[in-house]
Image (tube, rainbow, N blue to C red):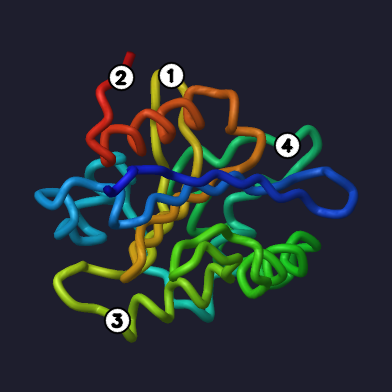
Amino acid sequence: MNIPQSYETIVFDEGRTYGFHMFVVPWRSVPPTFSNKSIELLSKDIKLTDPIDISPAYLPHALTALVPEGDPLPNVESFNELRVAFGAAGRRPEFKFAQQVAFARIVPFESSPLTAEALASILVSGVAGAGAVGIGAKLGIVAFGATTGPALLLAAAGGIVVVTLASSAGTEIGKGIAAKVQEWMGIARQ
């Protein structure tokens, strides 16, 4: 019997100033008619605007771009702001934490059995195991309700991962991504 499930994890920097909310959906948890969706179709499905292709080596840059600059922290709401943040990521203080998140084994991911994996490893394993599933990573802006913000989408051989700012968890973005995960899994919303 296959029991559909998803995983969520939130990680914060040491000072608990900023963090990342990760939604993980194993391919075994989505209906067979859905499991052949490419990264392009998935990014359109969550309305990821002007997505930027991300290679495993640039995952820390993409994660850093999710974190807005300034005090108080404004939200990255436009494609131009996101592209600038991506380009300047390596010079920002958040980059070191983003490297840890990209390369440390902290993401709950099914590979048999459930283990903690690194985002970069998940993406690289997708490249190595690519078959019918369109793999890759995209960075862009999502909008749910009246709220917009950046998101990182990964599709790999084992499943789908969506990363947003941890501060998005209770907002329209977090609720929208959570609802989309349930939709991907074929779960009717209550």
The mark that comes first in sequence, 4 or 3, is: 4
Q: Amino acid at mark 3?
A: Gly
In the image, 109 versus 12, the foreground residue is: 109
Left or right of 65? Residue 111 is left
Q: Are marks 3 and 2 in contact (CB under 8 Å)?
A: no
Q: Residue at x 26, y 60 (%)?
A: 39
- Mark linked to residue 73: 4
For label 3, the residue is: 129
Q: Which residue is mark 1?
A: 146
Residue 140 in picture, x, y percent from top left: 41, 51
Foreground tag (2 vs 1)? 2
Q: Of the two numbered discs 2 and 1 on the same chain, state the one appearing first in sequence.
A: 1
- Residue at label 2? 189
Looking at the rendered image, the disc whose residue lies closer to the viewer, 1 or 3, is 3
Q: Point out the residue furthest to the top here.
A: 190
Q: Amino acid at mark 4?
A: Leu
- The residue carrying pointer 2 sits among few (fewer than 14), some (14 to 19) or many (20 or more) residues within 10 Å by Cα, namely few
Q: Is residue 147 above or below residue 162?
A: above
Q: Secondary structure at mark 1?
A: loop
- Disc on the earlier residue, 4 or 2: 4
Q: Are marks 1 and 3 in contact (CB under 8 Å)?
A: no
Residue at the (43%, 57%) spot, across then down: 139
x and y percent of residue 47 in the render? 29, 40
Alpha carbons under labels 4 and 2: distance apart: 33 Å
- Could you tell me how far apart the alpha carbons at marks 2 and 1 are, in whole angstroms? 21 Å
